[in-house]
Amino acid sequence: MSLKQAESKGAIVKIGIVGAGITGLTAAYVLADAGHEVSVYEAAAQVGGLASGFRDSSWEWPLERFYHHIFQTDKAIIDLTKTIGFEANLFFRSPITAQWWQGQLYPIDSPLNVLRFPALPFQDRVRFGLVVAYLKYLYNDWHTLEQSSALEWSQRWMGKAAYQAILQPLLEGKFGDQLQEVNMAWLWARFRARSFKLGYFEGGFQGFVAALQQAAEKLGVKVYLNAPVEKVENDSNGWLIHSAGAFQAFERLLITSSPHLLTKLVPQLPPNYLGKLNDLRSMGAVVLVLALKQSLVKDFYWIHGMPKAEIPFLALVEHTNFIEKKHYGGDHLVYCGDYLAPNHEYFSLSQDELLARFMPALSRFNANFQPAWIRNAWLQRETYAQPIVGLKHSERIPPLATPLSGLYWASMSQVYPWDRGTNFAVDLGQKAAREICTSPLK
């Protein structure tokens, strides 16, 4: 049954959405396409959420605040791109990703290069490659995998050498001292969903979300920017959204936010549900974006696997080794990014203080690097960026429909077992829209 067919049984007059990230905009588009009156409230000055961008005065294209690309397997966002008429702006390339090992960079952008990675004896490389291929192409029972930790399962089946050389730096970088809790279903999903070819949009992801906003507005969606929601209330007629000293009433309400913001906006949720929200933990993201006058790591796009004892950030991404620098006024754009606990000191350091921490490490990637190469820098931070997924995590995720009638919640905490990302934000928005339309009021 299509969404429009389901809606013919009983129309919803007004639906409010808090958050104009990709999940919120996708839900708004689908709901409006089904004939409903939809309003979206966004605290920021532009749409996009974690996928939004910024632009220097000399750039033709905006750049994402946090590095982004999509995979060839990302069906939901690729199909939506076609639906809104933005397909011609999507392209795929094969940039070179690399693994750091003993101060050297080794390309791992193909199965053959993975087998050549010298950190492992040949037989361990073959074993690792076979297990990854099995997980990627043949294995589907992720519910069983979430009963084992990624650490334990990968050491048992891929070998301790492969775990220490390849997976441990990834898990430590993503989850810090929480890595032992992460279940194997999360790692399975990363292997399953990824491709060596990576996709990007002309005009960046800000171009995509702007096109999605425009498509939604053509269907009648109202998008309010610079409109932080102060509180929401429910009564016998539905839900009231308070923003900028005024309020609007809606029959149903979708909040696309962190668990913490949901508890703040709707403290009247039942205590047991609030307890589940408070039990959901996540890592934050800190990214320092540098505009350089010269390339830092020629040819390589994405570099990971650096030990924290040697390099003070998780990943180094030279965006302009993927997308031509001509779109950015000739700048060579580099991300130095990390996932950290929300109380980490990086969330309180100034941009200059963090640059002073990161800058000495840049010469490890290029011995010729000089501070004078830096033309400009931008610091981006979000405290809710990467859910921590422990054993049997599926049992801990609240459903989209909250215990309060007409109230729904959709966040990256609910895309599990998949990792957070733009594709699964689209998928989640579509699921939320379907549930809003087809679930009866309580």
Image (spheres, helix red, strand yellow):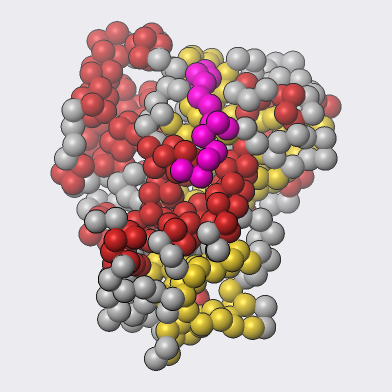
Q: Residue furthest bottom?
A: 236
Q: Which residue is at 26% across, 42% downward?
A: 185
Q: Relative to 440, say whether 167 is above or below.
A: above
Would you say residue 412 is visible in this rendering?
A: yes
Q: Relative to 431, say whether 180 is above or below.
A: above
Q: Is residue 76 magenta?
A: no
Q: Position of residue 398 (x, y in %)?
A: 31, 65
Q: Which residue is at 78% across, 24% downward?
A: 330
Q: Which residue is at 18% across, 28% downward?
A: 138
- Total labels drawn: 0
Q: Position of residue 401 (x, y in %)?
A: 32, 69
* Residue 194, quarter of picture: top left
Q: Nearer the viewer, residue 137 or 434?
A: 434
Q: Relative to 418, say whether 169 is above or below.
A: above
Q: Which residue is at 44% across, 17% downward?
A: 108
Q: Nearer the viewer, residue 297 or 49?
A: 49
Q: Is residue 96 magenta?
A: yes
Q: Is residue 23 left or right of residue 135?
A: right
Q: Nearer the viewer, residue 289 or 41?
A: 41
Q: Position of residue 51 (x, y in %)?
A: 56, 46
Q: Is residue 181 left or right of residue 202?
A: left
Would you say residue 272 is visible in this rendering?
A: no
| Magenta region | 83-97
Which quadrant of the rendered structure holds the N terminus?
Answer: bottom left
Which quadrant of the rendered structure holds the C terminus?
Answer: bottom left
Q: Position of residue 251 (x, y in %)?
A: 42, 79
Q: Nearer the viewer, residue 43 or 270?
A: 43
